[in-house]
Structures are given as structure tokens and as C-alpha cells.
Image: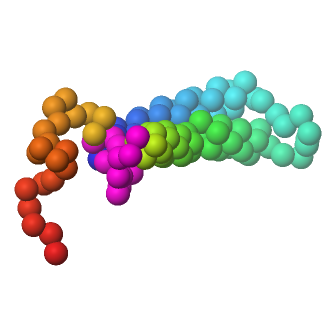
Amino acid sequence: TPLQASLQRLGVLIGFFAIIVCVIVFFVGLGLGTENPNSAKMRPWMYMILVAITLTVAAIPEGIPLCVTISLSSGCSTMVSRNVLVRRIAAVETLGSASVICSDKTGTLTEGKMRA
């Protein structure tokens, strides 16, 4: 669906910028000689690798697909409460982007194709 494609592009973009920021944080911390306050045995470069990896994992959004699924299912349940039969949850997104909906005299929406 178009929404999934947009979310994919957004995730790649955020991930790209997160990696760039983490590389910058690594080199700045290494240049400043930042040390682990909890362990004097750990070398500064090892500590900064851990900080950069932690920052990368925290910066990449994992909850966006979940939020979209919840909002689509909310739209689906709203449509069901108004007596609309929704077979696929992606249909909610497609219907939301429609500007004109045509139906026959009974109100049935069809594709104009026969199904078995």
C-alpha cells in the first residue's frame, strides 16, 4: 500500500540519519577521551563503541508500524460499527484516499469482475 511504502522510506531515512549521528558521537567521544565512569578497565574506544551502538538502537523507530496498524484497525472498527463489511485492513487506507465512490442502486460496491 502507499502508506507502507511511505513508512519504509521514512524508516530508511531515519535509520540513515541515526547512523550518521552515531558515527559523529563515536568520533567526538573518542576525540574527547570519554571514559566509562563505571569501569576504569574499559578502554575509551570500546566504551564509545558501546555508546554509539546503544544510541543507534534507541534512535531507530520500531513502533511506527505498530501505531499505523492500530490506527487502521481503529478505522476498521469504526466502519464496522456503521455496518460496513471490511475484509482487508489495507482497504481502510485505500478508502481513505478515495475522492469519488460509485455504487449501483443497491449500494453494493463491486470490481466489475466475476468471482468464484
Q: Quadrant of the C terminus?
A: bottom left
Q: Is residue 96 left or right of residue 16?
A: left
Q: Position of residue 22 (x, y in %)?
A: 59, 34
Where are the magenta residues, as a range? 82-94
Residue 3 figure quarter: top left
Q: Residue furthest front?
A: 106
What's the residue at 8%, 61% (across, down)?
A: 113
Of the pair 43 and 85, the residue shown nearer to us: 85
Instruction: Locate residue 71, reporting x and y percent.
Output: 49, 39
Q: Is the residue 89 above or below the residue 29 in the image?
A: below
Q: Which quadrant of the view contains residue 30? A: top right
Residue at 53%, 34% (x, y): give it.
Answer: 18
Would residue 108 be found to the left or right of residue 96 on screen?
A: left
Residue 102 on image: x %, y %: 13, 39
Would residue 11 be seen by someone viewing this image from the given angle?
no
The magenta stretch spans residue 93 = yes
Where does the image place residue 92, in percent across and percent down from the top left?
A: 35, 43
Q: How is the image coloured?
A: rainbow
Q: Nearer the viewer, residue 105 or 101?
A: 105
Q: Main secondary structure of the magenta part?
A: loop
98 within the magenta span: no
Residue drawn at 64 percent across, 39 percent down: 58
Choose top left, top right, bottom left or bottom right for residue 43: top right
Evaluate whether residue 75 shows in this view: yes
